[in-house]
Structure formats: C-alpha cells, structure tokens
Amino acid sequence: MSQPSTTSTGKLRLTQVSRRIGAQLLLDQLSLEVEPGEILALLGPSGCGKSTTLRLIAGLDPLSGGAVWLGERNLTPLPPGERRVGMVFQSYALYPHLSVERNLSLGLELRGQNQASIQGELQRVLSLLELEGLRQRRPAELSGGQRQRVALARALLRQPDLFLLDEPMSNLDARLREDLRPELRQLLRSAGVPVIVVTHDQQEAMGLADRIAVLQEGRLQQLDTAEQLYSRPANRFVARFIGTPSINLFSRDGQEIGLRPEHLELARPDAPQAEGWRGLDGQISHQEWLGDRVVVHLTTPGGTTLRVLRPRPAPEGPWQVRWSSDAELHFDPRTGVRIH
C-alpha cells in the first residue's frame, strides 16, 4: 500500500464532551487530546462510555455539551460525511451485494485513483490482513472475523484525517490478533493522523496504544502510558482494572493496601524476614497454571485471599506471604484515590 501523506490536519481535541439521554448520563465532560501519529486507546468495562465517545467524534450521535476539534476545524456542527473519519465499528457496514474486492476498491475509484494504484494498494492490504483468497466472496460468505478484517482494510485504504476503531480485532482468533497487532500499529502511526482505538482488552490496548484513557461510568479515571497506569494508578478502580492477574487489595492497620502478585514472595513462617519486609500467614487454596507462570491463591486467617505469581507451583504449606514495603500502593478507603 502506498504510504499515506504525513501532512496532518492537526491534533484531535475533545473539550468537556458530554452525552446524556434523558436522565441517563453516558459521558461526563470528557476532555483529552490526541496528537497526529499518536494512538490513544479507550479502555474500560462495558457501558463505561468508550463506544459513545467514538460515535460522538464521528458525528453519529449529537453532543449534549462540549466540542470536538481536529486541528483548527470544529467538527461539532459537521455531519459525519464531512468529518473525513476512517471508522471501523463492530457492525462492519459492508455492501452485502459486492465482493470483498469491490467493497475495498469502490471508495478508491470514487476518489479518482487509477487502476494500477488501486491494485497495488489492494494487494498490500489484502496480504496484510490475510484476505487474498477471499477477493471474490461476498460478506454473507465470510465469517465474522473475515468481515471484520475487510472493514478494517477499507478504513486503512481511505487515508482519512482521523482513525476511529471500535474493537477492531475482537472477532479475530488469538494468533491473528498477535500477528496483526504490530503491523496495525505501524500502519496507523504511519498515517500521521490521530487514532483512537476502543477496546475492553488491556493487552490489546497496551500493545497498540501510546497512551490509554481508562473510563468508568462515563468518567475519565486516568490518561497515561501503560507503565504509569500499572505502577502508579490514580485510584482503586484503575489498579483493579489494569494488570493480569489482578492486584491484591486488603485492609491493614486502617489502610487499604494494594500489592501486585509479582511483588509477593512465599516463605516458611519460621524463615528470617528481611528488614523493611512484611508478611501474612496463609494457606494455599488452589493454584492456576498459566504456562510459564503459576498463580498461587492463599487465604489468610482473616479471610483475605492473596494471589502470588511464581515461576513454578508451590508445595503444600504452611506459608507466609511476604513483600517489601516499597511495593505497597496505598488507597483512601473512602474515596479509593491513591495516596502513595
């Protein structure tokens, strides 16, 4: 595929963007910026406002407040067709009576590209997304994953001013997702335009995006790099949502403490304890084999369950879970905000 122009229309800016339907608040004064060539992931559970944000940027739904800017252009009053957005939504929106090849080439023809250029771009994107053998099939003859790949290919061919992708790889098998992710990241970044990817998969968000915006119930919880979200979460929700296995949270001495499973170690209760380390006695309830690692679940006498990430299974106890005080994250028990 020919390289898109790196001449950008400018950064994407959302200023206090809101969406309300009756008494239901779907998005609450969301403000963020995405630089040209940057990939931003919107991450969060179902119903948090991720897809709503994309629909507002694309002009598919009206804003209840705020504005959407792309460079010096205010997109807010413009209809979807004038926003020059490359969209990939879960609904695919393919022409059912056209073949894969025609679904992809039609837009290029309407923009006046010559056949030699069209065929070159088609071959590159068909090869990238493993669609070469499906050129003459119609959407009804494709699997869900194949239809999603065609929709993604069509967006890549448009060379828009802005990319919006809603769960772009959700219907692909694990192997194809893993193979496609670095290629997709390279293609999106090379376009030189802002990119927003919506996903509920934190691995996909971390693999694709430069920064990640974590949403909950229509509100932005934290906007940061994957490393900062993991090591310095803004609050209890982000700490729980980011990381697999999930963070351990428990109360001790009137504080709520968070500990990542890889920061915990197992020791026999009578083994010497290093200075600055703390511990809790526990009994193994079960162990999960993850291939290269094992998650050991222990239950303390007080009923707290702790997950410890180890390279191999642990023999039968008794055990003490130990950790350095430097590994602790502290949260306000009332608000959930991280204290330190």
Image: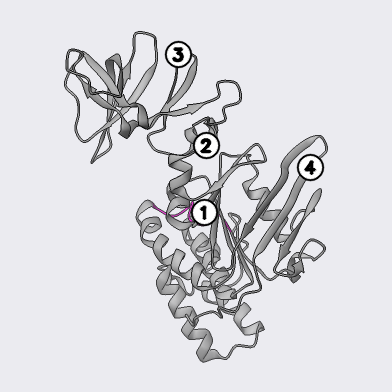
Q: Earlier in the sequence, mark 1 or mark 3?
A: 1
Q: Is residue 166 magenta?
A: yes
Q: Earlier in the sequence, mark 2 or mark 1?
A: 1
Which residue, given by chain and number where applicable, does mark 2 sit on? 238
Residue that extends furthest to the top in the rendered view of this protein: 301
Question: Which mark is nearer the camera, 3 or 4?
Answer: 3
Residue 288 image position (x, y, % from top left): 28, 30
Q: Identify the secondary structure beneath mark 3.
A: loop
Which residue, given by chain and number where applicable, does mark 3 sit on? 253
In the depicted view, which residue is nearer to us: 258 or 177? 258
Q: Identify the secondary structure beneath mark 1.
A: strand
Q: Which image quarter: residue 231?
A: top left
**Residue type for callout 1:** Arg
Q: CA distance from mark 4 to mark 1?
A: 26 Å
In the depicted view, which residue is nearer to us: 255 or 245? 255
Q: Earlier in the sequence, mark 4 or mark 1?
A: 4
Q: Is residue 104 above or below residue 88?
A: below
Residue 180 image position (x, y, % from top left): 40, 62
The residue shown at (28%, 37%) is: 290
Q: Earlier in the sequence, mark 3 or mark 2?
A: 2
**Residue type for callout 3:** Asp
Q: Earlier in the sequence, mark 4 or mark 2?
A: 4
- Which numbered circle lies on residue 211? 1
